[in-house]
């Protein structure tokens, strides 16, 4: 396990309104976030990906994660 730790946060792909981003989908967002995580891991970081489901619980989710 690396001593370089990253908490990566992103919107949960199942709760995003994709009408605002034509061409984007839950599958593409998930792949992008997981790709970012995998890239950081390949650089030697210990990474945990955390999904945010809504604005009301974002702070609590981040606080618990950290």
Image: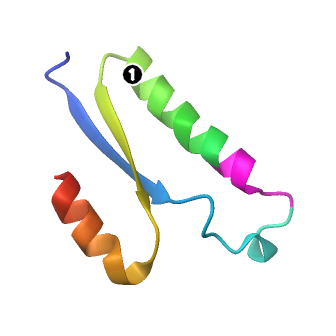
Secondary structure under the numbered disc 1 in the rendered image:
helix
In the rendered view, would you say 34 is above or below 50?
above
| Location of residue 12 in the rendering, given as x and y in whole percent from the top left corner | 53, 60
The image shows residue 61 at horizontal and vertical percentages of 28, 65
Question: Based on the displayed image, in which of its 4 quarters is residue 48 positioned?
Answer: top left
Residue found at x 22% / y 53%:
65
Locate the N terminus and report the quarter of the image it occupies: top left
- Say which residue label 1 marks: 41
Q: Is residue 7 above or below residue 17?
A: above
Examine the rendered structure and indicate whether residue 42 appears above or below residue 38: above
Place of residue 45 in the rendered image (x, y in percent of width and height, measured from the top left): 29, 24
Q: Residue at x 41, y 80 (%)?
A: 55
Where is residue 8? Give x, y as percent.
37, 46
- What colouring does the structure picture have? rainbow
Indicate the quadrant where residue 14 lies: bottom right
What residue span does the magenta drawing correspond to? 23-29
Label 1: few (<14), some (14–19) or many (≥20) C-alpha neighbours in 10 Å: some
| Residue visible at 38% across and 17% down in the picture | 43
Left or right, residue 33 beside residue 63:
right
């Amino acid at each position: 396990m690396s001593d370089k730790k990253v908490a990566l946060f992103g919107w949960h792909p199942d709760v995003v309104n994709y009408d605002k981003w034509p061409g984007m989908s839950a599958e593409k967002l998930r792949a992008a976030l997981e790709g970012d995580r995998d890239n950081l891991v390949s650089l030697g970081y210990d990474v945990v990906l955390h999904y945010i489901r809504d604005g009301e619980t974002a702070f609590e989710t981040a606080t618990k994660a950290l």
